Image: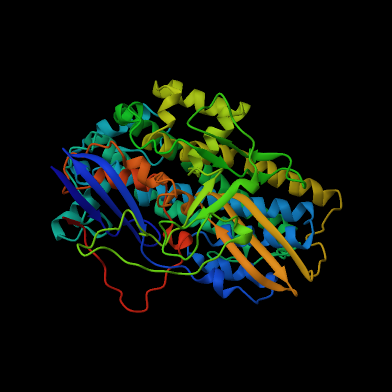
Amino acid sequence: MSKRIVVDPITRIEGHLRIEVEVDDNVIRDAWASTTLWRGIETILKGRDPRDAGLMVQRFCGVCTYSHYEASILACEDAFGVKPPPIARIVRNLINGAQFLTDHVMHFYHLHGLDWVDIVSALSADPRKAVEMAKGYHPNPYNCSDTHYRSVQERLTKFVKSGRLGPFANAYWGNESYKLPPEADLIILSHYLDALQISKTGAQMMAIFGGKNPHPQTLVVGGVTSVADALDTHRVGQYLFRLKEMKNFVETAYIPDILLAATYYKDEGAAGIGSGVKNYLAYGGFPLDDDWHNLLFPRGVVEGGDIADPLPLDEKKITEEVHHSWYKGGEGLHPFEGTTDPQYTGFDAKGHVKGDEKYSWCKAPQYDGRPHEVGPLARIIVAYAQGHEEIKGLVDDTLKVADLPVTVLFSTLGRTAARALETKYIGNHIEDWVEELVERIKGGDTRTWTRCDVPKAGEGCGMLEVSRGALGHWVRIDNKVISNYQAVVPTTWNAAPRNKAGGRGPYEESLIGTRMADVDQPLEILRTIHSFDPCMACAVHVIDPKTNKVKEFKVA
């Protein structure tokens, strides 16, 4: 007999997401992703000076602030026909690189790690065995000692005895889907606590060239304003000092912890649990030249998981559908033509989604008429399929150590591992950008801005890779003000409802076939959905003037 399960809200994400699934014999047979609060900023921007958009679109979210800032600036530069000088490109890369490192570390430990790690189990771990285990994954593990692990256990024990588990409360401890032994739980829990400080370090890196974090303020159409910081060797040194700390954590904690988790969850990865639509899209990111021809992450498309046949990206094939979204509209529209006109129709009499009608505030982006996943896994798969030497080598070496086939990438485990691998990859290249910055300054090139004026009319798009995936902003200008503005963000791609043809969005498809150990404890749903790093506030900007009520999980 089938059972309808509603998880509302999905926690440990930015914003509000409801997942509804149909379960038969503990296996998910159907799924619906519903974003439950509406975004209005695209409408607010109409009639405003396009140069102001960058500062305003940061308010889509409190986490992805820089991401939207740069995308908006790039869109305006495209519309204005202006190119920023090399130092501006480098500074933007340095800020965005710090954003990636910070976001990915925070995501695994504080947003996603507890889907793999049974915190309470760590209480029964033997600290000495934990030390031995950690050294099996790195010769010099981060903050690894018998004394330290015992102190972590003591801190957790105080939480448990007090009855106030704080951030570890209301979870599904003891669920059969947890696979790690107590010692592994203790190791990763230890790094969970360490990562609180490390995330702060990454935020400081962003603030050095961004002015502050969140909501940096040093980008302008045509360049950057952080002249004194970019040209100051002391400030560059401060950035490098923090980069060294971040890289050390990635190398000695993050990557080893992913390998540790993969050891015990490899069967789930090999079974392809969480694979999803298997269509992947990447815009390409981190320009290494001023014409965006040479990118750290290549742009491209992979269809149906066919890594033997990568395809080029055609921006004109991007559309957004609203057949199952709470907006007015008919056929899919390219973002330049897109509209954001709400048409809320609610849930059915039982409080369930109207699966055959509209059921989400999230639109349904399509590439060539099909849903596509974006994000770290998409970037890694696109690069791997194109034979990118460094990324392919990094993936193959890791798979060899973990004794796993390349097909494991098409899974929740693969999605989580891809995020860690690209963190290492980006970290290894940031020093190259600092060196280029220093060399250009030594050569006398200290330009940080190209003068430009608002055109009477024009349109432009800003497409780049940010921590959660492919981000695009499209702006249309008439009479020197914004006449239309559309942002298609990574979570819009991934959280999309069904398209016109009935094809499920990436979140929805990734849950199909998943077996749940206990339908009253939807741990498996959380694990897969969290692997995408949802940011609903970006996908659908939040406003709820009527109620602040927090909904509860229920089994209907």
Res. 191 in view: no
Q: Position of residue 504 (x, y in %)?
A: 39, 45
Res. 296 in view: yes
Q: Position of residue 355 (x, y in %)?
A: 31, 54
Q: Is residue 310 left or right of residue 347?
A: right
Q: Position of residue 56 (x, y in %)?
A: 58, 71
Q: Say which residue appears at 38% left-offset and 34% top-offset.
A: 411
In the image, residue 42 above or below residue 375: below
* Viewer-side residue, 361 vs 13: 361
* Viewer-side residue, 410 vs 166: 410
Q: Quadrant of the N terminus?
A: top left
Q: Say which residue appears at 36% left-offset and 46% top-offset.
A: 508
* Viewer-side residue, 76 vs 125: 76
Q: In this view, which residue lies farthest toward the bottom?
A: 546
In the image, residue 280 above or below residue 226: above
Q: Position of residue 453 (x, y in %)?
A: 80, 70
In the image, residue 407 above or below residue 302: above
Q: Quadrant of the C terminus?
A: bottom left
Quadrant for residue 124, please give it: top left
Q: Say which residue appears at 27% left-offset and 59% top-offset.
A: 8
Q: Is residue 298 left or right of residue 160?
A: right
Q: Is residue 194 left or right of residue 203?
A: left
* Viewer-side residue, 361 vs 222: 361
Q: Is residue 15 left or right of residue 201?
A: left
